[in-house]
Image (cartoon, helix red, strand yellow):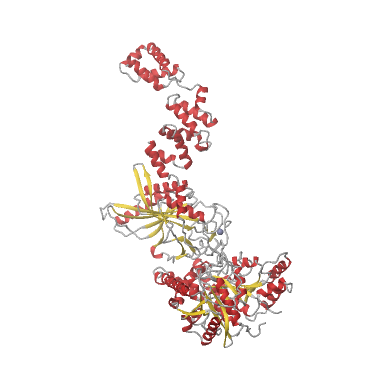
Amino acid sequence: MESRTAEESIAAILAGETSSAELVEDAIRRSEDDPWGAFLARDGERARARAKEIDAAAERPPLAGVPIAIKDVLSTRDLETTAGSQILKGFRPVYTATCVERLEQAGAVVVGKTNMDEFAMGSSTENSSYQLTKNPWDLGTVPGGSSGGSAATVAARQVPWSLGSDTGGSIRQPAALCGVVGMKPTYGAVSRYGLIAFASSLDQVGPFARTVRDSALLLSHIVGQDPRDSTSLDWWKPIEMPTAERLDGVKIGVIQEMLDNGIEPGVKAATEAAIATAEGLGAEITEVSLPSSRHGIAAYYLIAPAEASTNLSRFDGMRYGARAEAEDLLEHFERTRGEGFGPEVKRRIMLGTFALASGYYDAYYARAQKVRTLIVRDFVAAFENVDLLLSPTSPTTAFKIGERVDDPYAMYTSDVCTIPMSLAGLPAISIPCGLADGLPVGLQLSGPAFSENDLFSAAHALEQAIAFDATPAGVA
Amino acid sequence: MSTAVALEPVIGIEIHVQLATRTKMFCRCSLSFGDPPNTHTCPVCLAHPGVLPVVNAEAIRLGIVAALALGCEIAPRSVFHRKNYFYPDLPKAYQITQFDEPLGVGGHFSVLQPDGELDVGITRVHLEEDAAKLLHLSSGGRRAGAEQSVVDFNRGGTPLAEIVTEPDLRSASDAAEFLRQLQQTMRQLGVSDCNMEEGSMRADANVSVRPVGSTELGTKTELKNMNSFRFLERGVEAEIARQVALVEAGERIAQETLHFDPSTGELHSLRSKEEAHDYRYLPEPDLVPVVPAREWVEEIRSTLGELPVDRRRRWMADFGISFEDAEVLSETVELGAYFEDVASRVDPKSAANWIRGELRSQLKDSGTPPWESRATPERLAELIQLVGDGQIGSSAGQEVLAEVVASGRPPAQIVDEKGLRQIQDSDALGAIVYELLAANPKEAEQLKAGKHKLIGFFVGQVMKETKGSADPKKVQELIRERTS
Ligand SMILES: [Zn+2]
């Protein structure tokens, strides 16, 4: 069976050319044939039942029964949810995340849960405590992370789309490395209720898809205020399906800091080609500087671990999840958490614990928050002159499995282009803009808060002009 | 004694009151006391992965009520923090509480005393969630050596307001009285039922001593969780005595947390400062700051009404009733309203006496509160008036009250039916007095000569003659007139 985009699938179902049952069956078959290691859990039985139900319904829901995969960081009732961690091995939640619930109500059918770096901490999905996920473009390379499974499954065409979460680049960077579209919405656009928290002030759920239009369609069904998430925002303007073919009059600022240092030549070349394409579409290209963004990684690696250190404290084996045998309370905590968490998670808990320690708080956490404010100001200043910002998504294409595992700092720099937008809470999208040595390059567009529609429009026009149509070998 | 300098105690109190909301602070589980364990829980208060807290607006409102009643400034913006520590009663391993930006700051609370008022500064009022309840199952009952500990999460997430005073109290009894009047205020405003035995009001005391006249504070100790006024008073007293003895022996006071055992009267150390936690406070990223609209705060202020302390102060000044009367009668809003109603119709002091005395004792058996009894303020006032005017005697008054309580009928009607009205008519009584004086010439002479105790003899004779329906005061007056 040929793989359709979500939009094509919906049209085919509505035209009677296929059914939800048929598409879901195909997705289940593809998810079971998984040389990429994208899936952690599959939910075939319920997916089939749901598809049948949708096919039989008098009125088809808007998403018509199209299959979807969900990053394992989102709570799904009765379906094992581990966040990639041993400490949640076998954990079946009692409730479903708001965004997943909304998708199910809109007629998407969840076929399974995708692999990820443990608790979304990582940029290669190598920190999953369960399995490696391989990049469909080159099985010797990583898919990026932390939403590596959700990116790989779309690139491998197991499902037309998926949900991921982005804290410092965890949607955009794997989307770039896997040659798919990945989008991180404005902070607060999508409810975080049911998203297992890594860094609460940064985490956002967003879509992976093969097209910008699918990405917009998926987002349109999950945005909006949720009474269960106080930080969710009232989304008064609906997400529109983008149609733009041109960029006439759109002012695009190219972020200088992100084209200067440490960018691979192939990535730089593809980005420059995309800039030329944008100019050809009528965009006004200017150079923009975000001087404080060079401190982004430092600030991020204080703020995110600080929040993580307290977010992850609840995993104590008392009420759910794995628990170790112990003689007393202290030993219980030490052994359960010592055995349940992997090395990167422990590293960040330690980092965050120190950053919040009395006497160090002002020097680390409080100062990092000040840097965050400066970064926000940089963006505000930039958006006085331009509509959107452009940069590479990742300084490199997919790197080799194992290449950076022993070098945390090299791993951390994977997110140098994506972290500033996360710290500022801004929406950003990564679209494929070409290949470098056979591996996809991602182009990042970002905009002011609530500029999702403008971002999708511009990304759509560029997507059409770039016409990236390569597929990984062995993927159909 | 190594020092002759007199020492004074310095006491500050931290009070936790459980807010009288229907649901918990950050989830929609209902509150309960005494229900089977773990029947009021949900993914949020059990800290399941991925859940988020949502602030209970009613808890904010009650917190504002409490802060306003304590004269605090309501912060235009207050912030919840995470207070991190691992313990099985804390499922998130952090408590959501307000830290350096509390809901209310800078208030004061007047404690009325028989001989004046004591002004206690209120440092802050902030909101937080309660921990779950740990039950240690062992034959001995103490935590050490417990074979098993189990957690009841029903209480976990209960909304609390923490009230912190300045170190303005100077005696254990003042501390207890402060707490009593604070309890009355919080109860009457509907902030909390403040039940110390059930734990809906808990008090910790910070105690230090210093030479009288010094303005510096000594090293303080913290007395945890005293669950009655009496235990608080005894505990603080014991701690003051311990500290004074240490200082007088030239020893240092260690900063520590203590537990007072009311059964032995002893103080046990719970933990010292050296073991203090680093709570790693962090602004709660899952919540937005509390920014109460000015108009909302003013609306809440306008609903507070007269605070108990102001009411008592007014009664004592305007009605002239005693400190004790005012204290008893202001116990509940309803009793206070009942008293005010009666006092607006008759002499307030008599009203206070009748309500606290005869009415209370007559209602004791049925347990009916005065304001729900058949003795409405109007009826009681009529009765008090009848006695006050000398229309009926006080023992007749008790009889009439019993009937009013039973039937709710007008006292005047009961008096007439039972023929209880006293003879007030000077002419009629005068005639009887004249006859009796004439019939007992010897006693009359002696009385005239100054043997005043004989007046009782004649009054008794008149009462006998009138079958008790004469007003004895009036009779006395008449006898005096005729024998002087
Ligand atoms: Zn609950």
Where residue B332 appears, as percent x and y from the top left, is: 47, 42
Q: Is residue A81 above or below residue A463?
A: above
Where residue A413 appears, as percent x and y from the top left, is: 49, 80
User: What residue do we see at 41% from left, 61% from top?
Assistant: B100
User: Among all residues in the image, which is located at the extreme bottom?
Assistant: A437
**On-image quarter of the N terminus of chain B:** bottom left
Residue B394 shows in this picture: no
User: What residue do we see at 44% from left, 39% from top?
Assistant: B329
Q: Taking the image as four quarters, which one is ligand 1 found in?
A: bottom right
Quick one: B146 or B20, which is closer to the camera?
Answer: B20
Where residue B236 appears, as percent x and y from the top left, is: 38, 52
In the image, taking residue B484 as reference, residue A419 lies left or right, namely right
Quick one: A384 or A170, which is closer to the camera?
Answer: A384
In the image, taking residue B316 as reference, residue A318 lies left or right, namely right
Q: Is residue B7 above or below residue A428?
A: above
Count of marks overlaid on the render:
0
In the image, taking residue A329 as reference, residue B180 lies left or right, namely left
**On-image quarter of the C terminus of chain B:** top left
Where residue A151 appears, as percent x and y from the top left, is: 60, 77
Residue A296 shows in this picture: yes
